Image (cartoon, rainbow, N blue to C red):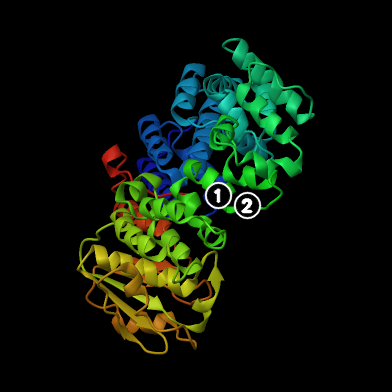
Amino acid sequence: MTTPQPSAVTAARSELFLLAARALADRRAGELGDRLAGPVATLAADDAWMSAFIGWTRRQPALRLLALAAAAEYLRTRLTARLATSAEARRLGGEVLLRPEDPGDLLAYLIGRYGRSIPKPIRQAVADAAERLYDEHALAVHDTPRAAMRFAEVIALTHPEPSGKAQNDVFQYAARRLKRERPVPESLTTLRARAELHDLPAARRHRALERPDAAALLAVARMDWEQVAVWLGGEMTAKAWAVVLPSMTYRQRLTVLSALDGAGLSGAVADRLCAELADEISVRRGGALPLEILAACRAVPGSRWSAALDRALGHALGQVPALEGRTLVLVDRGAAMARRDGGLTRADAAAAVAAALALRSPSVEVVQFGPAAGRVDIGGSLLESVDRFHEPAGDHPAAEAVHAHAGGHDRVIVLTHPDAAVEPAGSWHVITDAGDGWFAAIPAIEQARAGACLFGKENDVQARA
């Protein structure tokens, strides 16, 4: 392999880090293979930098798939060039393959790009991970039809060695369950408990939830709320919700509030849920971010959850960066912003990003352009600030707003829609898909532009997928 020139190395580092920084806010972070391969090949001999880069991306939840893709490309390139050893592949695999779905996702990436001829050291690294990560709980929770590769496929391709009888039963049953073969081995108590619940006649399943130990039965079977809903034929009663709510994550609860609102929950259950939604520690531990909480607010306006969600929005601002320097945020209020993307309109999402940044930093100025252009007074709660923006209407070119307002600022952020004709320049950020990921992406992109690619854990950003 020819040693790249220093300028090529610097350019490849910058390109790779900028790809990762942008992917913090890009829902297609796992689709960057073609763009990753070039800079990774240039940096194949830059072991210290690449190891630090891969480690940094793996610590960002939103970049899990990108980290796996980068590690796969890096290892494959080094092995092809005979720069890497089997021990290095297994070491990196131990650092990157951390979750039960990771081995299948890494193999699926390589097979999708290069076919089924996987270098032996990578297969060994994946086998190590399967031995470490594949247990009954992982099989019950992560080996689903939605997985990129099923456990049985990973096992057949990499041949991991089971550590004992229990794991041997897991490996064997992973293959048998694809053929719908039964019974479940005696040692797999979780999957046996699940099978017993599914053996109950449909007419008796709601009655089973009346048992005092109903929550424990579902917990033993490791059935999440969506599986319980399917088990009940889609009919989630107040009792069913009361049983599954304790095992749901904070973010899962946010997504079902509208269903809970019409389910007739008892006052005691609703009060406990409100207290947990409003609790600062619960918000932080659950990784809830401002826009997803705002989407829950919009889904249940004027409900008994509203006060708790308003408090949660305040707690979630701790995940938003306090930007340094004078920042101008231009928010498009044209008619195109009325379109709904997911749980929020583009207008609400853009207003929420702008308001959150301004609430975190007094040097952020927010200006809307549209039916009534001008500065927006940000203050009080996030929800109050979002409601101060005008309703979307008309067509108001973003480029004109930039020309009118952009002077004298260290940073310009334009929140608009995909068809807006405005090109970023210098310290501008043109955002056409406003979302929570941009709170992490903006500082990271600026680091990349400045060449300050810092990978210490103290520089980690908290972005959720």
**Residue drawn 62% across the image and 31% down it:** 140
Report whether residue 442 is seen: no
Relative image position of residue 108 (x, y in whole percent): 64, 36
Location of mark 1 (residue)? 241
Single out the residue that lies furthest toward the top: 164
Q: Describe the element under mark 2 as helix, strand or loop.
A: loop
Residue 300 rendering spot, x and y as whole percentages: 49, 67
User: Which class describes the residues within 10 Å of circle 2: few (<14), some (14-19), or many (20+)?
Assistant: many
> Residue 428: x, y in percent?
34, 67
Q: How many marks?
A: 2
Residue depicted at x 76% and y 22%:
183
In terms of secondary structure, where does tag 1 sit?
helix
Q: Is residue 6 left or right of residue 166?
A: left
**Amino acid type for the residue under numbered disc 1:** Trp
Image coords of residue 127 (percent x, y): 58, 20
Tell which of 299 and 433 is nearer to you: 299
Q: Is residue 182 visible?
A: yes
Q: Which residue has dot 2 on it?
A: 236
Query: Quick check: 261 above or below 78?
Result: below
Point 48% across, 72% down: residue = 346
Say which residue appears at 50% left-offset and 46% top-offset. 245
